C-alpha cells in the first residue's frame, strides 16, 4: 500500500468555536507521543475521512504540518452519536524502525461444512488478533477461511492463521478462533424421563385421616 499523507495546520479555534470549524469542513486532530510535543491541529474533513478509510486503525500515515512530518497511527476516532459525522481524531506518533503491538481484525470468509450437520453450529470465538510488527508491516486484516471446519469436531486455532512476513503473533497460539459446536439431540425417552422427574409426586392421605372420617 502506498504511504497515505494528509496536510494539517495548527488549530487556533478552541471551545465553542470548534463547532463553526467543523461546519466549515475542517476537523480537529490531536498528534501526540514520542518524538515531539503534543499538537492541536486541524485538517480538511474530506481528506481526513478518505485517509481514515484507507489506513483504518492498523496502518500508519504521515501528517504534514508545514515543513514538519509526523509518522502516526490512529488511536481514537470520535463521531457524532446520531449522524456519525467525524468530530475529532487522535493520532499517535510511532517510529518507522521500532516494532509495536497492534490488534488486527479477523475477517471470516467462506462456509464451514461442519456446521451443516444436525445439531451443529459455527462459533466465531475471536474477532481480532494481537500482533507485533513494524508499523508498515501490520496487515489491515487477517483472513480466516471457514472451509477448514470440515466436520463436527473441527477447530481453527490462532496458530493456524497465516501471518505476513515480519509479523509475530502475540495472542495465545492455542486460542480458539472458530470451531464447530455440536448440541446432542434429545430423544423421546429422555424427554419423557425429564417430564416425569419434573411432575409433582401425588400425595397420599394419611391412614389416620381416614379413621377420623369414619362414623362411630
Image (cartoon, rainbow, N blue to C red):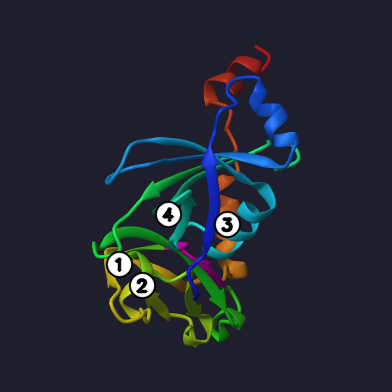
Q: Residue 146, relative to residue 44: is it above or below?
A: below
Q: Which of marks 4 and 2 is nearer the N terminus?
A: 4
Which residue is at 55% across, 58% downward?
A: 193
Task: Measure how far apart labels 3 and 1 are at the Cα level.
Answer: 19 Å
Per the image, label 3 sits on a secondary structure element best described as helix
Per the image, label 2 sits on a secondary structure element best described as helix
Quadrant position of residue 155:
bottom left
How packed is label 1: few (under 14 Cα within 10 Å), some, or many (20 or more)? some
The answer to whether mark 2 and mark 1 are in CB contact below 8 A is: yes
Task: Measure how far apart labels 3 and 4 are at the Cα level.
Answer: 10 Å
Q: Residue 83, relative to residue 99: is it above or below?
A: above
Q: Which of 111 and 3 is in front in this view?
A: 3
Per the image, label 4 sits on a secondary structure element best described as strand
Residue that sits furthest to the front in the current view:
67
Q: Residue 141, relative to residue 111: is it above or below?
A: above
Provide residue 98's location: percent of width, then percent of height. 23, 62
The residue that mark 2 highlights is 137
The residue that mark 4 highlights is 73
Q: Which of marks 2 and 3 is nearer the N terminus?
A: 3
Quadrant position of residue 177:
bottom left
Per the image, label 1 sits on a secondary structure element best described as loop
Residue that sits furthest to the top in the current view:
216
The residue that mark 3 highlights is 52
How packed is label 3: few (under 14 Cα within 10 Å), some, or many (20 or more)? some
How packed is label 2: few (under 14 Cα within 10 Å), some, or many (20 or more)? some
Task: Measure how far apart labels 4 and 1 are at the Cα level.
Answer: 12 Å
Which residue is at 30% across, 63% downward?
A: 96
Q: Nearer the viewer, residue 67 or 53?
A: 67
Quadrant position of residue 214:
top right
Can residue 159 be seen by looking at this rendering? yes
Amino acid at each position: 500500500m502506498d504511504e497515505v499523507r494528509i496536510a494539517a495546520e495548527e488549530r487556533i479555534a478552541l471551545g465553542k468555536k470548534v463547532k463553526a470549524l467543523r461546519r466549515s469542513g475542517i476537523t480537529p486532530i490531536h498528534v501526540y507521543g514520542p518524538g515531539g510535543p503534543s499538537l492541536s491541529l486541524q485538517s480538511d474533513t474530506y481528506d481526513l475521512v478518505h485517509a481514515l478509510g484507507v489506513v483504518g486503525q492498523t496502518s500508519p500515515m504521515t501528517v504534514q504540518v508545514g515543513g514538519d512530518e509526523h509518522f502516526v497511527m490512529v488511536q481514537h476516532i470520535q463521531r457524532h452519536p446520531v449522524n456519525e459525522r467525524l468530530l475529532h481524531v487522535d493520532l499517535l506518533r510511532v517510529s518507522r524502525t521500532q516494532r509495536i503491538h497492534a490488534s488486527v481484525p479477523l475477517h471470516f470468509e467462506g462456509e464451514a461444512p461442519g456446521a451443516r450437520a444436525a445439531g451443529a453450529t459455527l462459533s466465531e470465538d475471536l474477532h481480532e488478533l494481537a500482533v507485533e510488527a513494524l508499523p508498515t508491516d501490520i496487515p489491515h486484516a487477517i483472513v480466516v477461511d471457514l472451509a477448514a471446519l470440515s466436520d463436527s469436531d473441527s477447530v481453527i486455532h490462532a496458530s493456524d492463521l497465516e501471518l505476513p512476513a515480519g509479523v509475530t503473533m502475540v495472542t495465545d497460539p492455542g486460542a480458539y478462533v472458530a470451531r464447530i459446536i455440536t448440541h446432542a439431540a434429545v430423544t423421546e425417552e429422555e424427554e419423557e424421563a425429564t417430564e416425569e422427574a419434573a411432575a409433582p409426586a401425588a400425595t397420599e392421605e394419611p391412614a389416620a385421616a381416614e379413621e377420623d372420617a369414619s362414623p362411630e
